[in-house]
Amino acid sequence: MTMVELNNGGQTDLAGVHSAKGLIDVRNMGVTFGNDDSRVVAVKDVSLNVQPGEFVSLIGPSGCGKSTLLSIVAGFVKPTLGEATLDGRPIMKPGSERGVVFQQYSLFPWLTVRKNVEFGLKMAGVELGKRNVTARSLLDLAGLLSFENHYPDQLSGGMKQRIGIIRALATSPQVLLMDEPFGALDTQTRVVMQEILTNIWQQFRISVLFITHDIEESIFLSDRIYVMTARPGRIKAEIKVPLPRPRNAAMTDTPEFMNLVQELKGLIREESLAAMAPEIKDRGLTGFGMKVGPKGVGEIF
Amino acid sequence: MAPDKSSSQVESAQQAEPAKPADAAPDMPQPETIPTVSLREIVDNLLKKITRERIITAVLACISLGTLFIVWYLGTRYRFEFYIRFKNVPTPAEVLQQLTQVGLSNRYLVNIAISLRRILIGFFFAIGIGVPLGLMIGKYPRVRDLFMPAVEVLRPIPAIAWVPMSIMLWPNNEAAIVFITFIGAFFPILLNTIHGVHSMDGVLIRAARCLGANEAQLFWNVILPGSLPHIFTGLAVGMGVAWVSLIAAELISGQFGVGYFTWEAYSLVNYPAIMLGMITIGVLGLACSGVIRMVGSLLMPWLAFAPGGKR
């Protein structure tokens, strides 16, 4: 694709080590919210990296600080401790070399679909004709060219997220950061979107940091998975996904895939229980037995 | 919601587009054909717009206005007098006669023109200051802390209460009246603009930053269009208050203007002219808010698809 060359042609070998761009490196990261009295340690001593062209997922129970980590890499939040770098340069603020796809729909409702995709290019001062061509070819890639003149409010959730992805790709970022992008979609749409994403990624081969709490999703998409603990979030395990590329839906039934799911489920379950500990500390899960019986809750009282 | 209304807007939104890519990207292949318009299509489209929903709307509007008219007509016809006195109220026929006598006279039209000019000048100053200031106050807490105390003190003072001060402040009556009109329109516009910025989804601002927007670009491309629906609410409210303020100012201190026309008629015991003046004010106010609504829907075609139909 021409778009990828746009950015990579200019700067090469900044650190003198990596010829490919898009290396995310997070070192000894700690994030604390609040003041002395109401201190919350969201993330504690996390180190992780995404190699150029690698698809890495970050998975963990809700509230473990995985979205906070992504916000740091995106440049919205400053870490309390440690540092995040992209290709050796520290990340200070948001920028178009890091595309972000949000969990909420984040298309500008006052712009047509094509103008939404063009947004980043317009900000960069790319001339109208050129950004038109880029936007249309990306829309074609996502199968949405016929909707280029629609407004976001006319589209379904899955379409909006696909446009969100290609909008983030339009400025040829070195990395793509995705914060549970399919979290708001129904299960069926989700599965299809995962396939579309893996196809798009195979064409661009840029580094992706993908946040999710869906085990199958993380395995299907990733080369590597980091599992985080309950709050304060730490890296509990790092798992390689040896499944071949290109991936397709049939792979989810293979024994390798199933084994990975089992392994991750075990890791996550412990953490989910830990995350819920305050709610279930006395009785454990057995406390939620079926003593109520078929007549319903009303019978107890 | 009227489903046929939205579908007709879909058509117009799609039809409006094909012209753009042609001048935008001359090197792109053009799959769209240039639409040809025949007279028959136009007539068909017009007929299609006469739907059940629209007929009902029109009938209810007639009932609404007709009731006012019938109360007026019957009250003056039978000289109704029970606490409320219709004794001196002019009949519709008298007002119509007044309109044909005065209505096309120079004096009446000049009065309308002068009132409109005052409204336009005051209103545009209110937009010119209210919208940028509102955007800044909405965006930057420091600016808010600086301006909001003064705004909160000045806001409860009604525009009419500004009349004596305004006459003292400004060198002539004309400037004083325009200033009062400005005061009336300013606060609704300012406060709605601030509210527009505050009610914007934060994820849109974060998304724009990630796409490389700097501060100025963020204002022009995200914050302004994102608060536009609320700004237009402010404009509609502001226009209404501007008319109220203008007429009050003209009644008290004016020379010329529709308010002055009405007050002069009262001094001269010309009752039909009072009624004519009142109706003129009503129609002019209606026309002005109609223009604002029209401009709003032209600038924000996307609102037609917004969930819940914001407008």
Image: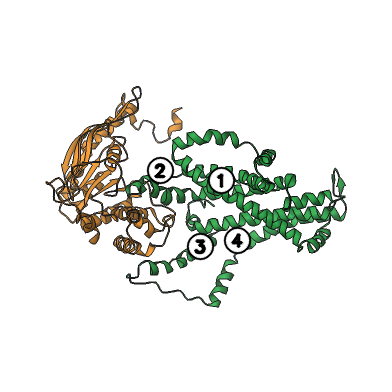
Chain colours: A orange, B green
Question: Residue beneath label 1, please?
Answer: B189
Q: Are marks 3 and 4 on the same chain?
A: yes
The picture places residue B45, in percent across and down from the top left corner, at 55, 70
Tell me how far mark 2 sits from mark 1, CA to CA: 22 Å
Please name whichever residue, A146 or B229, is drawn nearer the observer in this view of the structure.
Answer: B229
Q: Are marks 1 and 3 in contact (CB under 8 Å)?
A: no
Q: Are marks 4 and 1 in contact (CB under 8 Å)?
A: no
The picture places residue B98, in percent across and down from the top left corner, at 81, 60
Please name whichever residue, A169 or A85, is drawn nearer the observer in this view of the structure.
Answer: A85
The picture places residue B153, in percent across and down from the top left corner, at 59, 33
Question: Residue beneath label 2, please?
Answer: B202
Q: Are marks 1 and 3 on the same chain?
A: yes
Which chain contains the residue that carries disc 1?
B
Q: Are marks 3 and 4 in contact (CB under 8 Å)?
A: no
Mark 4: few/some/many CA within 10 Å (<14, 14-19, 20+): some
Q: Looking at the picture, which amino acid does disc 4 mark? A: Glu
Question: Residue beneath label 3, please?
Answer: B9
Compared across the picture, whether A242 is left or right of A284 comes to left
Sequence order check, earlier mark of 3 and 2: 3
Which chain contains the residue that carries disc 3?
B
Residue located at (72% from left, 60% from top): B109
* Quarter holding residue A131: bottom left
Disc ID at residue B53: 4
Q: Residue furthest left?
A: A17
Tell me how far mark 1 sits from mark 3, CA to CA: 28 Å
Sequence order check, earlier mark of 1 and 3: 3
Mark 3 or 2, closer to the camera: 2
Q: Are marks 4 and 2 in contact (CB under 8 Å)?
A: no
